[in-house]
Each structure stands twice: as C-alpha cells, then as structure tokens.
Amino acid sequence: MKKKMQLKLLSKILIFTLLISNLYFPMEALAASSVTDFPGYSASKDYGRGVFSAAVNGGAICYDKDGNPLMCFATQGGKFFACDLLTGKVVFEKKTTKSYIMAHLVKTASDGKVWIQYYPGNTFDVYDPKTGEYKEVYPGVSIRSQDGGNVTDDGKILLGSYYDTGACAYEYDIATNTVQTYGPLNVNSHYVKGVDSDENYIYAGTGIGEGNAKLYRINKSTGEQSVIYDFGGSIVYNVKVNSDYIIAQTGSGCYVIDKNNYSNAKLVGGSEPSDPSPYPYDENIFYIIDYSKWIYELNAETKKLTALNVSIPLDAYEEAEFTQWTTLSTGEKVLGFRTNMMNKIGYFNPKTKEVVTHQLDRIADEGPNIQSIEISPEGVIYMGGYQTAMAAYDINKNEFVYKLPYWKQNEGVGFLNGKTYFGVYTDARLWRYDPKKNWNYKEYSGDGKYQGSSYNPVMVYDIEESQDRPFVLKGYNNKLYVGTMSGYNELGGALTIYSETSSGYPSAETFRNVIPNQSITGIAVKDNLVYLSGTIRGGLGIEPIETQAKIAVFDTNTNTVVTEAFAPDLPIVGKTSQTIGELSFGPDGLLWGCSEKEGLVFAMDPETFEVKKYVSVNPGDDRGALARPLYLRWGSDGLLYTTAGWNVTAVNPDTMTYKTIVESCSLMTLDPYGDIWIARGSNFYKIEVSWFARLKEILDTTDFNDYESSTALGELKVLCASASLLTEESEDSEIISAIDAINAKKKELNDTSKYVSGFGAELDYLTQTVTITGNLKTGEEVSVRILSPEGKVVLLDQLSKNEKSFEKTYRISPLEVGEYKIYLDAKSYVKPVMRSVNSIPPDRRIIVNNKADEDSSGIVTTRLSNYFDVPMKLNFFTAEYYKQTDILKQATFETYTVNPGDFAIFKSQLGEGSDTDFKLFIWDENMAPVTAPFEN
C-alpha cells in the first residue's frame, strides 16, 4: 500500500472545516462504503523478454558459395541461424517477423537450400546459402505440421501433422509448389511425427494415446495405406529408411524392421537415429547419441546396438543430436551434430571415431513464449516458457534474479510458507524453490523420488496417476492444493494435497476423478472443504465424454467427496459451460468463478450453490473446452480482476459493473502493490493501477460551470478542494472515498433529463431481444444496464458519447417471466433514466399446432395453447397454415384473451377464392367449453 500522506498546515485547517460540515470523505478504509468507480490504468509498459533460452529445433547442413559446410537451425522464438561447421562462427541469422514458437522442420533439400517450417505457420521459410537470400514460400494449402519431417532426393519434403483426430502425412513438391495429403491415417491418432520414404512408399508413424503407435506404409502412386507394424505404445517419434530396413523410434527405443518381412522386427533400444551412412560406408549402419552424449552404432542388418565408448564433451544439462552427413575438404564423410541449447556444433568421424566440437561464438538472445506467470507475496515474478526455460524477476529491484534455460514447462505456480512451487509438464511433477537458500539445481532422474534437501530447486513429488499438467496450485493453511489435467489418452484429472515436515520432507495424497472424466481448472479452500471446478477436456489423444463442466466439493477430514460433481445452472449460459475457470472466495463470503462462455463471472452461495451475482464481461465470447484456467485475482481495493472472456477485466463485486483493461490476453497476475502484470508472446508487461490517477482525471475534467449555482455546488467545490490535497502517497482508501463523494455529489447536482430524451424500450420475446432508442447529451458518458425481473444485472454496455441519437438491440437469453428494467446511467448524474418492459420466455410462448387435421370439406382445426402465468390478450394474431411446404392460407384474428392453462381452437375454411370463417372456442384444462363460440 502507499504511504500515508503528510498534510501541510493548510490541509489540516481545511480538513477540520470540512469535518465540521460533515462533508469531508471518511479517512478509514472501505468498510463504510463500497467502491463505485474504477482506478486509472496506465498503458502497458513492456519489460521485454521474460524467459531466455536458445533452445534449438531441427538441424541441417548446407554449403555456402565456396563449398564450406554450414550448420543451420532455428531457436525458439523464430530465429534462424547458419554457423560455420568448422569454426562455430555465426555467418547468417534471420529473425522472423511473425509470432512463431518453434521450427518443426529444418532440412536441406535436394536443391541445396534449407527449408524451414515454423509453428504455428502455414508457410515455408527458405534460405539459400550460396546467395544469402531468405524468403517465404506459400504452399497454397493449410499445413498443420508437427515436429519432424524429411527430404527426398527427387525434390520432395515430407511432413507429419497434428489434428484433433486423424493425423495426416504431407508430401510437398518443391518444383510445382503443391501439397499431397495422405490420410487421415489412424482415426484415433493426433500426431504423425516420424516420416521417411523410399522410391515407392512413404513410411509414417502415428500417435499419441496408448495403442496408437503404428507404422503406416503409403503407396505413392495409389495412395493406398496399410499398417505394417503395431508397436502397442503411444507414439512413433522418428522414422529412417534405407534399401532394406526401417528404423522406427518409439518411447521404448528403436525398432529395426525388415522391409521384406515386416514381422521380422526387433527392439534394440536407443534414441533418435541418424540418417543411414552414405557411400562408401555401410548404409545399414546408423548412429545414435544416447544418454545425452554417448555415441552408439546401430547395425540394422544384425539388429544390434553397440557402444563405441565415444562421447561428445558437453556441459551440464546439454544434450546433443545428430543432424546430417557432410563431406569435409579432405573428402571424408562426417556426421554433424548440434546441442539442444545453441551452445555447440560439431561432427563425428565414424572412420577415425574423432569428435570435433566448436563453441558457438555467441548465444542467441532468444526464448520461447511465456507459458505461465505468477508473482510471490515478496514481489518476485516467476515466468515459465513454452517447453523450456524459466526466469524470476524481482519487481522491487527491477532486475532478474535468475534466468534458467534448462527447465521443463511450468504450467502453474503456487506459494506456501515462503517457498515457491512449480507444477511441471510432463508427468505432473512438483518442484520446490526456497528463495532464502542458495541455488543448487540438479536435473531430475525420472525415478519418481524426492531429490533431497540439498538441492534448490528440488523435485519434491511425482503426482503420477496418469496426470500431466499441474495448472492449479493453491496454498492454504500449511498445505498445497494441486489440480491437474490428465495425461495423453486419459480422462480424469486429480486433486493432490501436499504438505511437508518441519525439515521439508514432502508428503502428499492424490485423489483422481473427484470430478469424473474432467480435469481440474479451479480450487478454492475454506476450512476442511475443497471446492473444485473442471473442464471436460482430458489429455491429448482422447475426446471428452462429458458435455458440461462441473463443480464438486471434497472434505479433507474424511478424504471423501461430500458434494458430488454437478453442472451449475448459470445465468445467461445455463448448463452449457465446458470450462469453469478458477474458483475463489470473495470478501463477501461468496464462491466466485467464471465460465468460458460469454466471459461470465459469477458468485454463488457456497452451501446452496445459488448464483447471487453475475455479469458477462465479453458477451458472445465462446472458447469451448479449455486446458488453461481462466484466472481470478482480488485487488487490495476490493475489485476482482479476471481473464474471463480472454480479456483482462476489472469487476466491481458490489455493483457488478466492469472495465476491460487489456483485450486478447490470457496470462495475468497482480503484484503485492496492486499493479497488474501480463504476458503476451515472449514478453511481459506492467499496467500500473492508480486510484490517484483516476482522482486526478476527475478533478481535471470537473467544470463547475456545468452546474447551476446551489448549496450542492458549493459542497462539490469543497469536496474537490479537499481531494486536491491528496497525493500519490495517500492511502488508496482515502482516494477512493474522495472519488465516491465527488461522484455522488455530481450526480445529485444533475437532473436526468439533461442527458437523455425520447428514451424508449421494446422487448421482442420471439427473438429474445430488447431494443432501446433515444437522444443523448453530446459528450456525456452513458452506460446501459438491464436488470432481470429478479433484479440481477443481465447486460452492461457503453453508448458512444459521439452519437446524439442511438438505437441499440440486445439479445437477452434465456428470458425470465416478469418485468425487465432498462437503466441509462450517466457518469455525472445521480438518478438514472429507467424504462420497463414485460417479458414472455420463448420456451413458454403460445404454441400453434399446425398439424391439425383438414376434413373433407376443407375445414382446418388449429389449437392455440396459453402456457403463461397471466391471461394473454392477442391483437391481430396471424396464423399460417401449411400443407407440405406451401403456405395455403394466412389468417388474422381479432383481439381476444386466453387465460392461463386455456386453449383456443380455430376453425378455418380453406378454399381457393372463398371467404374464410373463423370460430373461436375457449377451453379450460378439462377441455370443457367456457365461452360460447362466435363467428368473425
């Protein structure tokens, strides 16, 4: 909070005078009155890149105009590099102008050029090492590529893909700029990664999901597809082909498959294989870098993997990967490699077993997009990158505490007892970082065990239970509550309750499917009860079986579900939510949440689950089933900040008004001083929240000449004079009280007729719309507020202050029975203009039975039912009679009334050129006539 203002003597004298006249705004906090305005929000200040990592994707060797070999690759963030393989010097670099995350393909094609396919993107980037030209090529069709791919000797590029269901393989023809799509291959598969070809066939491996790892053979001429090997696992990562064998890498290791007898296959182990050895070497020999740095020889003919006792000299956390074969000036053929973090490049000579390594002459100042952002109570921002990297930025010192390029993907961050916890993807592992201790990081071995107290950060708990992404981490009463998304091909997230001994030894229990078949996106804890919300999404590779996002309550005393999962019936969206975002208890004691539909923010009674408050902060928005939660954060001023509707929005929990601060942003947090921090792409930004800025705006724009001379005007002048003594160092509570007092006095000074005239409102229950019309005072800020018959705000909108007249139509769905009130609220006026309209819900409107029988004389009998709670008086009701699809007759009836539960029977004589008689009968629920028939 800001420091308390030190008033000068003049200030004290004025305040004393104001206190005597009871006009001075209260000095205490907001307990006496609720906030009625919003603070000032600064433009977002760009703090630059949030995470730093030269993580490399792909790798290829090409030749410059002098025949020198160049190692090419792309770093995360979309930057391409070409480095001299023999010196490590960067000779070319190119930052893409688009928001790319990584390169899915970097290969040298038969034309000698390097072809790059970035994600997400629909184009190729092409680098010509002989001329230095770098350009984009548009293939003309949408390509949803996946990392991997290969090139052929006849000018083709092979790509895998990612689809929600039924992944494909692509073949791009460089000469014709055309794409041939093969697939979908496996309808249950999301990925095709490994892909290679020979003269007649393309070989493509599929995944993810247990049992989806299959190897397909595709006939290039006919497109015929067939499964030639089922690995039984989840995915095929890489495929390499020579004349006689296929090498397929799965999660279990490399398989060698005989092309003449597909059943003759053997798992030999190892990781990603190199291309087959070129002439004069044996093409049945492949090479593998395993355990990060050791080189193995894979003999496809003997199906044996042999350690060469040769390693690549690497630093801690570095890994190496073979790229392509190249020929040195001596004529020797060597196999190039590069490390995973733009540190080293080099080559391996199979003939001499020599390894030559070159340190790159500089490290790329690049990094991935920010995947998560959260701030500690001490003011340290923790940011995790997509796939890799993490950084911590201290807002008190305005400097990075650390930048860690070697890290897994943080999905969520939480805090407990002064320590920071990271929820890491994959395999849903919890890491702990103690900022009071020295940094001592060790790569996790994957054995599922606590690493020990000597490391910092340290892996403390492997959640397992088929979980993958820990998005939600909430500290409460010495325990950390973790909500996770299920793993690949799995439905059903989990709640993990984590605690530690005084020495820091971890203990945890995991409860899966608290919300059956749904992943956890929200946790709020009160005493022994844990409230959870979900998304219908599971891991990749499986479709949801639920259709409605649910809420459940878990009792930690008994470790049982005490409120079974249910789909909340929310205003505006009903039970159609597919994601309920974060949950949080508000200062009002209500349980707050949000839906992915309509940007709906709601507050419910935590015992009855009755919705007490709600507002749509982005009407019409519908994101569907989400993985990442929608966030809720409470400001120290009592306002609620949220990413519901995919915008950063402030919501006043008392008035349920809202203010959009940043559009199209899904990552947001608040610092201890009330300012907002957001992440977009690879950068992070600060938005200063200042009640003083809002007060200054009000004071600067207040013109006393706008008001007639009166006692109230004098009181307004005194309030403004008092408020002008406040400074940026004043307590927010003082400033808010001043703003509220000035706003209230301004509204008191004005009559509503001064800002609107000719205000009218109509409701059409058939289209479920309300239309308002009228004329505005020029320059006045006027908002529209529509209240349901129960008094709930169902719509908020802002009218353009540049329009003198307005006509606006709003959809209100579902309609409730009763009176809707439409208010026009002006910023400077105390009394809003109000119009009311009666509503008739569409699901209870009059039903006309157009399927009534037509007798031989041509008389059609139609029954009209009144399902309303009140008598219906119909004026000039028009009925249309259909036969097949042709309208035979349209008829208009005179005014009449049908009481609740009654029916009206119409008889029409339909004959071409004849008059039509109408007879009306009113019936009660027992089908007894209650009025005499009449003719019109």
Image (cartoon, rainbow, N blue to C red):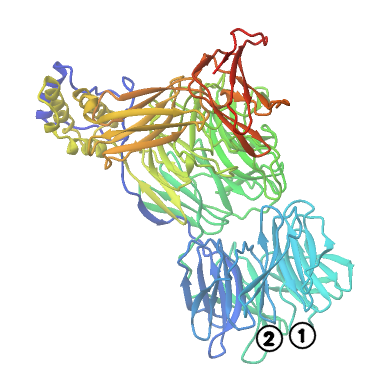
Q: Cα distance, mark 2 to mark 1?
A: 9 Å
Q: Position of residue 704 (x, y in %)?
A: 13, 31
* Residue 503 relative to residue 894: left or right: right
The residue where tag 2 is placed is 333
The residue where tag 1 is placed is 281
- Does 579 sit above or below residue 129? above
User: Quadrant location of residue 806?
Assistant: top left
Question: In percent of the image, x 67 and y 52: which residue is there?
Answer: 164
* Residue contact at pointers 2 and 1, CB within 8 angstroms: yes
* Residue 403 relative to residue 47: left or right: right
User: Quadrant location of residue 34?
Assistant: top left
Looking at the rendered structure, the kind of residue marked 2 is Lys
Badge 2, how many Cα within 10 Å: few under 14, some, many 20+?
many
**Residue 849, labelled with which disc?**
none
Q: Position of residue 664 (x, y in %)?
A: 45, 48
Q: Say which element carries label 2.
A: strand
* Residue 841 relative to residue 773: left or right: right
Q: Nearer the viewer, residue 436 or 936?
A: 936
